[in-house]
Image (cartoon, rainbow, N blue to C red):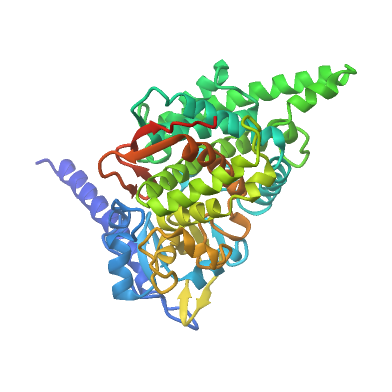
Amino acid sequence: MAEGDSCWVAVLVGGVVGFILVVVLNHFWPLLFKGKGGTVPKGSFGWPLLGETFSFLKPHSSNSVGAFLHDHCSRYGKVFKSHLFFSPTVVSCDPELNYLILQTEGKLFECSYPKPIHGILGKVSMLVAVGDTHKRLRNAALSLVTITKSKPEFLHDIENIAIQILDSWKNKPKVIFCEEARKFTFNVIVKQVLGLTPQEPETSEILEDFLTFMRGLISLPLYIPGTPYARAVQARSRISSTVKAIVEKRRARRRNNNDDDDDNNNSKKNSDFLEILLSVDTLSEDEKVSFVLDSLLGGYETTSLLMCMVVHFLSHSPAALQQLKQEHLKIRSMKQKHDHLDWEDYKKMEFTQYVINEALRYGNVVKFVHRKALKDVKYKGYLIPSGWKVLPVFTAVHLDPSLHANAPQFHPWRWESQDPTCKKFTPFGGGSRCCPGSDLAKVEVAFFLHHLVQNFRWKTEGEDQPIAYPYVEFQRGLVLNVDPCSETTM
């Protein structure tokens, strides 16, 4: 081998060895961290670079904590250190610490999702934004939800779409319920946010791109042409363009209506999120478009998954299903056959709320959230170092037998005496990042159940469980054998 070639080989080998040393040192250096006033929780870091991420993400039933958390909590306690998503991390299965993390957003802790998530959601998405940007987006969301949730037009839309979905079942012996639930929630959210019906061409375009977007959100974050991640980023761009076009059309219509004495009737017809959003002066154009995408994401996936869990758990709890049906029959008996449900009817659905809360606790739509320590934080003798990631795990608290009696069982009656606003129940997060659309989700599920339990009997086909990947889904789509009741109320 020539002397020059030998030199290049030595340089290459040296570079590779140096890189490996840097990776290894970077991985294990935090283990040597000793802060003032406390010690980092016990735990393990696993392999260099990857850490324990694959073990943490190993699929398991969503109504269990999974092998990773069970093993680590048994060995190290409810608060332990690990190395997840390329970062030194403190994992919390402790309700008090979780509450502290959620309530001190922007002070001690800050939202910190992996950077590839930002590439798909966008820099001004409410899910990843921090500081003043997040505050403005959240205030707008809360205002919209408060204005919308009890409006008759919104409630009528939910009920009409539920009836349309269930009408399509009458000649079907079985349905794939996850698909039906997503169809329902997508049609509701597109109607409410953008004023679009299922028949309009923009609806099909948005749905096609949105499904591509969703697949990329849970894929390997490699921006290489043809990969799910790259296609998701492109799909988000197309959705943004479609939404901007709809916004411009709406603005043009509003300008025309301002010159027309009859515009009052038209503005009543267009009382959706977008109409209200266009009047919000505190958000930029990009923030308004991002807000629409966030609404689609939250209203589509989370709500449909909650519906699936409710139906799945009810199919295995005949007593709960019977009491739920009696509640809705009583509500319907006080109305004319074709009368719409209203906000007063919703407030009477007490046991329905117990069922929804229990599905959220037992099924765990959201397993954990990502946070980062903004400064050294002391907690019960532990030290969470500044810059470390922190993962408050809701599942572990929801299924903790020391906090919930008969925790491994679906038991809606526990909510007759248990406060759903307590620290040990955080299905939608908490603090300034508590999901602003949670009330809307519950209304949608309750109205759909109202017609489902009165018009159909169902049984699940095969053994299909909600599996956490960590995102939750039913492996077979929750296939239901359905049978129309003899007397229908739709």
Residue 292 vertical position relative to residue 255 in the rendered view, above or below: below
Whether residue 239 is visible, yes or no, is yes
Residue 136 vertical position relative to residue 177 in the rendered view, above or below: below
Closer-to-camera residue (279/362) = 362
Whether residue 232 is visible, yes or no, is no
Residue 26 vertical position relative to residue 4 in the rendered view, above or below: below
Please tell me which residue is depicted at 63% across the width and 38% down the height of the picture: 291
147 relative position to 39: left or right? right
Closer-to-camera residue (479/189) = 479
Please tell me which residue is depicted at 26% across the width and 60% down the height of the picture: 47
* Residue 360 at x, y percent in the picture: 47, 54
Q: Quadrant of residue 9?
A: top left
Please tell me which residue is depicted at 27% across the width and 68% down the height of the picture: 71
Residue 376 vertical position relative to residue 246 in the rendered view, above or below: below
* Residue 390 at x, y percent in the picture: 46, 63
Residue lying at the far left of the rendered structure: 1
Q: How many marks?
A: 0
Please tell me which residue is depicted at 32% across the width and 55% down the height of the picture: 53
Quadrant that contains the N terminus: top left
* Residue 335 at x, y percent in the picture: 65, 38
Closer-to-camera residue (22/176) = 176
83 relative position to 104: left or right? left
448 relative position to 284: left or right? left
Quadrant that contains the C terminus: top right
